[in-house]
Image (cartoon, grey):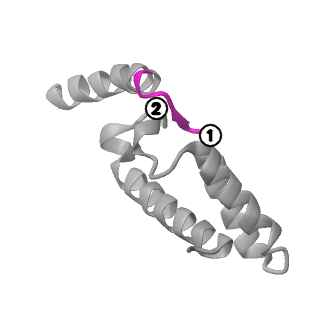
Amino acid sequence: MENNLTKMERIIKAYGKTVETIGLDMPTKYPAMAFPQSLLPFPKEEIIEALNFCIENTNQDKKMTENLKAVAYVLTLFVEDEEADKRNKPLLEHLKKHKKNE
């Protein structure tokens, strides 16, 4: 059976990969910085729990703590899929129209 630390590390690693992918896709898919919640590898609550666990247990490494807090903030940008689409769609249409006119 997986211990708590291993589980938290697995959640953080999977979430980190998601954040990295989204960062690459942001200009072309998510210009409003609203990300579909369905892209998360685990439920938001589990990711928050894992991030909080890691923040509490890395208090000697200030840089790591700051990085964890930054990715915790990014989690707030994940919203219901319909809401993400609603926020991104007008900007994507504007960008598409702007590219046509170049």
Q: Position of residue 99 (x, y in %)?
A: 20, 32
Residue 90, located in which quarter of the rendered image?
A: top left
Per the image, the residue denoted by label 1 is 76
Mark 2 vs mark 1: give the one in front.
1
Secondary structure of the residue carrying numbered label 1: loop
Q: Residue at x 25, y 27 (%)?
A: 98
Seen as rendered, the residue at the extreme front is 1
Q: Residues within 10 Å of mark 2 (few under 14, many from 20)?
A: some
Q: Position of residue 15 (x, y in %)?
A: 50, 58
Three-letter code for the amino acid on which mark 1 is drawn: Thr
Q: Which residues are magenta?
A: 77-82
Task: Give the structural element (helix, strand or loop) at label 2.
Answer: loop
| Distance Cα–Cα, label 2 vs label 1 | 13 Å
CB within 8 Å, label 2 to label 1: no
The quadrant where residue 29 appears:
top left
Q: Check the image and report above or below for 55 versus 32.
A: below
According to the picture, the residue beneath numbered tag 2 turns out to be: 32
Q: Is residue 52 above or below residue 94?
A: below
